[in-house]
Image (cartoon, rainbow, N blue to C red):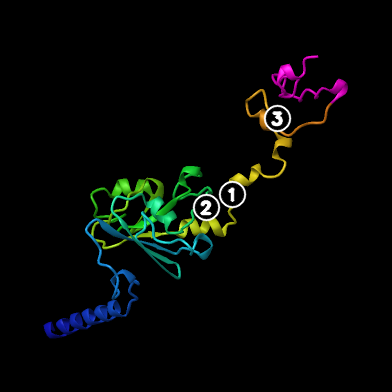
Amino acid sequence: MRARTALAAAAFAAAVDALSSSSPTRWRPYLEPGAAPLKDSQCVVRFVNVPASALDASARPSADCFEIWRRGGDVVIVTGKTFSLLNVAVSAGIGFPRGKLKAPYHQDTMSDCCLVELEDPQWLDPAHPRFEWMTEQGGRRGFRPVRACDTRVELPPGCDEMVLDFTIQAGVLDEGFVDPAKRFEGDWEADFVGGSGAGRQYQKLRPLGAAGRMPEPAGESAFDTTGGAAPWDVIQ
C-alpha cells in the first residue's frame, strides 16, 4: 500500500514538473546576449496586454526609460527604482486614455484615468494578515489595482519584474473613448451663456422674446431676466 502511495505521489510530482516546464515563459530581452547588465539602482517594468492603438512605437530610450523593447502586447522597460510609473509609461510610448473608469475598480472619476493592475502574488491571499483591507481595495487574486500617477517603480515581494496589466485601459479604448477636450472644438462658444451660476450658465441660448429680451424660464423665477448676460451689457 505504501509503495503504491509513493508511486502515485511520484507520478503526480512528475506531472506537475512537466506542466511547469511546458508552460510559456516570459520574453526577457534584457537577459539576451549583448544586453547591458542591470544595475542595483535599476528595475524592469513590463506592461502586458497593451493594444497597438495605445502604443507609440517611435518612442526611444530617455532619462526615464533606459531601454525599451516591444513585442505583441508586451512593453519591457529598464528604468530606475522609485521613478514615477506614469512618467515611465508615457516615455516608453504607452498612452493612457483620459477617460472615466467603471466599477468594480473605482467609481467614475477622472482621477482613475491611469488605473492599471500590478501583479502581486500576495494580493488577496486569504492567509495574508491584511486580507480584509485588500478586499476593501478591490482587484483580483494576484493583481492589485494601482494608479500609475501616484505609484513608484519598485519590485513587489517575490518578483523579479514589476508587471502591469493594461487590460483596464484597453477596455476604455475598446468602448470608444472620446477625448473630453473635443467638446471645446468647433463653435462651442455660441452655446455658452455666462452669468447667474447654479449650473444655468451652461445652458443653450434661447430665442429672444419681445423687446429683444430672453423669456423668463418656467419654474426658474430665481434666474435673472437677462438670461445670464451681465447687467452692464443690457443697460441702455
Q: Main secondary structure of the magenta part?
A: loop
Tag 3 secondary structure: loop
In the rendered structure, which amino acid carries the disc numbered 2?
Answer: Pro
In the rendered structure, which amino acid carries the disc numbered 3?
Answer: Val
Whichever of labels 1 and 2 marks the residue nearer the N terminus, that label is: 2
Tag 1 secondary structure: loop
Whichever of labels 3 and 1 marks the residue nearer the N terminus, that label is: 1
Examine the image and state in which quarter residue 236 appears: top right
- Which labelled disc corresponds to residue 193? 3
Q: Judge left or right: residue 234 versus residue 48.
A: right
User: Looking at this view, is 84 or 73 the one in front?
Assistant: 84
Question: x and y percent of residue 193 in the render?
Answer: 70, 30
Whichever of labels 3 and 2 marks the residue nearer the N terminus, that label is: 2
Q: Which residues are magenta?
A: 209-236
Whole-angstrom CA distance, mark 3 to mark 1, is 23 Å
- Which labelled disc corresponds to residue 97? 2
Tag 2 secondary structure: loop
Which residue appears farthest toward the left when viewing the image? 2
